Amino acid sequence: MEGYVQFLALLVSALLVGFVSVIFALVWVFQYRGGLSWDGSAQEFNWHPVLIITGFVFIQGIAIIVYRLPWTWKCSKLLMKSIHAGLNTIAMILAIVSVVAAFDFHNASSIPNMYSLHSWIGLAAVIFYALQLFLGFAVFLLPFAPVSLRAALMPIHVFSGLTIFATVIATALMGITEKLIFSLQNPSYSASPPEATFVNCLGLLLVIFGALVLWMASRPHWKRPPEENLKVLQPIGGTPEDTEAESTATDGSNANKSELKMNSEAARKQNFKLDEAGQRSTM
Amino acid sequence: MEGYVQFLALLVSALLVGFVSVIFALVWVFQYRGGLSWDGSAQEFNWHPVLIITGFVFIQGIAIIVYRLPWTWKCSKLLMKSIHAGLNTIAMILAIVSVVAAFDFHNASSIPNMYSLHSWIGLAAVIFYALQLFLGFAVFLLPFAPVSLRAALMPIHVFSGLTIFATVIATALMGITEKLIFSLQNPSYSASPPEATFVNCLGLLLVIFGALVLWMASRPHWKRPPEENLKVLQPIGGTPEDTEAESTATDGSNANKSELKMNSEAARKQNFKLDEAGQRSTM
């Protein structure tokens, strides 16, 4: 793998920053906000930031980069798809429970629901995430969708996944802003008490975590190699996914077929180099 | 250009959504917040959202996709770089003026500066944007940087540009949240007065604008073709940038040089197909 050490360093940094973010969320609610409970009180609301940061940010981030881990490249594609879908399902469940906690608290305290930009964009993110999970399951995990449909939807699936992830982080930042303004009174948020500074740092950690995940996910040379290459690692028989990958690679309209039969590893290198050249050409 | 009609539809949508966002910002401050002035009052602060949305969101978004416009592909790379840098410089100046307006208002009203997460991440975005602009100018616009340095920095330049853009939108959403909470009293934000609903819609427009720009910027087949192809359009003589593009395309370590001399258009098609296959392989 090209740049393996750099990848490892970034992975460890992302896991560390993500893990510290979860710890920060727990310290925030236990040290400053009275801990956790499930009784309609402000302590029930506290599940909201804890579960969003644990599930919707940290676990979703891991689900995004799980295909990038080079030691998983010898695992079957189906297994990796299941892990990706499983992690996203866990994140989805935690996000839904966290939204229920916020609604419960609002209802018990007669605070209106769904008035803020945070709630509008947050609910939209949850709905799009559910849709993404359902479509991903139906099209890419179940074996029924034709290869042409998978090929057409994959760029949209990748882009919408990364966009939802970035939107979730933006929504978390709005949520932190709201919560600090509403809950800090005497001293207020503007007086920068220790809680304000501490939770601002949590916000910064979320941005750094998001940037690390998006960088790892968007480097073309850190992608899981096409199945054709993986056959070298797994020479005994093929998997159903092989057909999918090969069909996609040859799903050309005008391309010269002999070009497409070039050695796959050389093609990946070529791909990366041309991609870099393409990026340069945009400057 | 592959998918020209789709590109045009997205471009028109992005321009429309961006333009409507600027109009919404103006309606917000003139209809609900007493208009604009420069006297330390709340009307001076109003320059802050107007200039951020006009410059740091809309103009920065256009600067990002300016290389994608197919009718500019016959223009020299140097001209397009200058337009890209010029638009970003305008956005930078508007962002700085808007920050001065916010500080002036805070100082005149004895409101502390730099206490909120919005201000922390916003100032970080301005600093990184200035750094990005300076480095982009020094490395890619001035003719002194070696090709190897340009090739190494280009992926970082592209990624950090898109990340700063997304961060600016996230910061704008936090700013909208803050401003609505602080300025809406009786009825409060939670009572959903018309201003709250209107400005929430502005927030949604910013998210849609961001997603459209990021989609257009990240489609590999909508990138400006490498200079080698453009020579077909401009057969009379070469430009200094040609060397840069060619050098980058051949800046390989282990790649077979004969592979790299394949026809450039076929290579782009191959590149796109392999990229799609690569994206599929990540599922």
Image (cartoon, coloured by chain):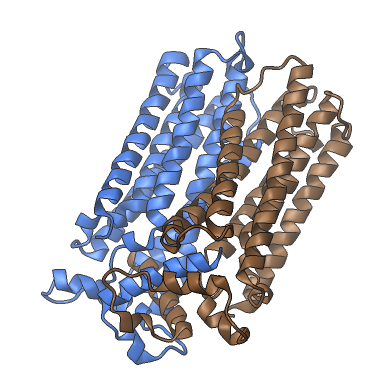
Chain colours: A brown, B blue
In this view, the residue in front, A137 or B25, is A137
Q: Position of residue A63 (x, y in %)?
A: 66, 57
Q: Is residue B226 left or right of residue B152?
A: left
In this view, the residue in front, B161 or A43, is A43
* Residue at image coords 87%, 34%: A36
Residue B235 seen by the camera: yes
Q: Position of residue B135 (x, y in %)?
A: 45, 62
| Residue A170 sits in quarter | top right
| Residue B258 sits in quarter | bottom left
Above-or-below relation of A40 to B123? above
* Residue at image coords 15%, 69%: B233
What is the number of callouts on the image?
0
* Residue at image coords 78%, 30%: A45
Q: Position of residue A233 (x, y in %)?
A: 62, 85
Q: Residue furthest left?
A: B236
Above-or-below relation of A68 to A192? below
Which quadrant of the rendered structure holds the C terminus of chain B? bottom right
Q: Residue furthest front?
A: A144
Which quadrant of the rendered structure holds the N terminus of chain B? bottom left
Q: Is residue A9 left or right of residue B233?
A: right
Above-or-below relation of B42 to B84? above
Q: Is residue A29 left or right of residue B159?
A: right
* Residue at image coords 69%, 35%: A176
Q: Position of residue A58 (x, y in %)?
A: 71, 52
| Residue B209 sits in quarter | top left
Residue A205 seen by the camera: no
